[in-house]
Image: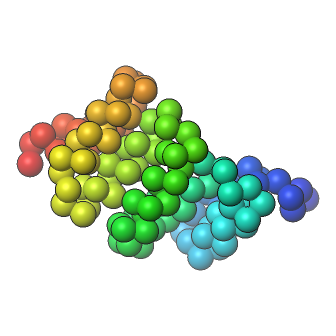
């Protein structure tokens, strides 16, 4: 398969594929390549944030996902992921706010709903 080396979306999608196969270093390289091509790719910033969550580097995750939301504040997935970063940083008030934002954008986001319910149980 040939990919367009100048297509930021393709690089982000390739990164997601590497992530699904647990090749996280290759995934990170692809996200960074995507962002070199287009620094305003909100999906790549969000993907990079998820990568940092998996590494348990929650401050970097928070920073990357906030960049995603600065570009596209209507991403329920990014709000949910930011909520996860705050959750792991034990900032439960901000985590709750993020999950609620995700649900305002997409009331059918079951992941955000489950995260909010988990937070309310704690």
**Residue 3 seen by the camera:** no
Residue 18 % position (x, y)? 63, 64
Colouring chosen for the image of the structure: rainbow
> 98 or 110: which is nearer to us?
98
Quadrant of the rendered image containing residue 106: top left
As drawn, 40 above or below 62: above
Image mark count: 0
Q: Quadrant of residue 76?
A: top left
Tell me which residue sits at (38%, 72%) in the image. Answer: 57
- Say if residue 26 shows up in the picture: yes
Left or right, residue 28 beside residue 104: right
- Quadrant containing the N terminus in the rendered view: bottom right
Image coordinates of residue 113 in percent, x first then y, are 29, 33
Determine the residue located farthest toward the bottom in the rendered image.
25
Q: Is residue 85 left or right of residue 22?
A: left
Please give left or right for residue 27 compared with residue 75 in the image.
Answer: right
Q: Residue at x 36, y 25 (%)?
A: 104
Name the residue located 24 percent from the left edge and 63 percent from the top edge. 89
Does 121 appear above or below 36? above
Instruction: Point out residue 16 in the picture as x, y percentages from the top left corner.
Output: 62, 57
List the single residue furthest toward the left.
122
Q: Residue at x 35, y 39 (%)?
A: 111
State the residue in front, 44 or 68: 68
């Amino acid at each position: 398969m040939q990919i367009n080396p100048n297509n930021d979306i393709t690089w982000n999608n390739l990164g997601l594929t590497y992530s699904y196969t647990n090749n996280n270093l290759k995934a990170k390289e692809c996200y960074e390549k995507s962002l070199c091509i287009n620094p305003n790719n909100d999906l790549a910033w969000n993907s990079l944030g998820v990568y940092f969550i998996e590494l348990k580097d929650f401050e970097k995750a928070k920073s990357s996902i906030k960049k995603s939301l600065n570009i596209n504040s209507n991403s329920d997935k990014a709000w949910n992921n930011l909520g996860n970063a705050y959750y792991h940083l034990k900032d439960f008030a901000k985590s709750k706010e993020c999950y609620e934002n995700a649900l305002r954008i997409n009331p059918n986001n079951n992941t955000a709903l489950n995260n909010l319910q988990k937070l309310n149980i704690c």
